Image: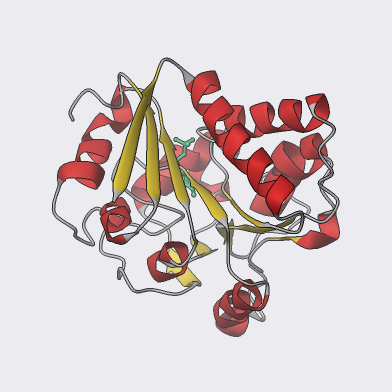
Amino acid sequence: MTEVIIVKNQDEAGKIYAQRVARLIEQKPDCVLGLATGSSPLAAYHQLAALVKAESIDVSQVRGFALDEYAGLDPQHPQSYKSTINRTVVEPLGLDPDKIHVPNGDLSTIKDAGTMYDEAIEAAGGIDIQILGIGTDGHIGFNEPGSSLASGTRIKTLTEQTRIDNARFFDDDINQVPTHCITQGIGTILKARHLVLLAFGSGKAEAIAETVEGGISSFCPASALQLHRRATVIVDEAAASRL
Ligand code: GLP
């Protein structure tokens, strides 16, 4: 069942996520967080960091797995998702970096990296709460339209549109944007015990309507949330305007 919560702004959405995660950490100090990049989750991380500080919550045992990574980009590159997750989540929350995993985009070992990543998630006991953004075309992680709803973590080719969208992070130069990525599959994402998808602004309205009320189809990868027992979609009024 998909629970839809309409909020005033990103901070309000972030507070809902932060409360849920804080209570989870209290119940299960070594819980496993599913982490995402993109602008949509930033307020949620910010609110969680504030709550952790205000309530002196011990996060030293918290574990985490990121959704995706560029392939063939040095993990030290400021725009790698490894660096991004460090900057936006690990450092502000004071998490133990050794407990936070990002898919390995090293081209020399990428063939087996997806399977190994899924095995590592399973060995950790699975993801307790997975935060998600959504692309304007309904993609989650880097699972573009047409991705199998049963897919595991694997290498994918980035669409031209996603490379154009992400060029803003690479000096507005599409030639610097990697052509491939490694992403958790939709099947991997669906294994998390709780999914929280955040979307803001009218640009996401069409994708949100397809996700929540459209048919379940690989043409809108996020519509797979309808197959999940516990999916929460938190949107502002603009993103909810087509519902
Ligand atoms: C990228 C990321 C996705 C993210 C999407 C939307 O493609 N791989 O995980 O959801 O961008 O990003 P934003 O939240 O900035 O709109």
Please state, as top left, top right, bottom left or bottom right, where the C terminus lies in the image: top left
**Residue 226 x/y as whole percent:** 26, 54
Q: Is residue 159 left or right of residue 110?
A: left
Q: Is residue 37 left or right of residue 97?
A: left
Q: Nearer the viewer, residue 168 or 53?
A: 53
**Residue 19 x/y as whole percent:** 61, 33
Q: Residue furthest left?
A: 215
**Residue 126 x/y as whole percent:** 58, 69
Residue 187 quadrant: bottom left
Residue 129 visible in the shown view: yes
Q: Nearer the viewer, residue 196 or 152?
A: 196
Q: Residue furthest bottom?
A: 112
Residue 171 visible in the shown view: no
Q: Residue furthest top?
A: 8
Q: Is residue 181 left or right of residue 162?
A: right
**Picture layout, residue 205 above or below residue 224:** above
The residue sitting at 48% across, 54% down in the picture is 194
The residue sitting at 51% across, 20% down in the picture is 12
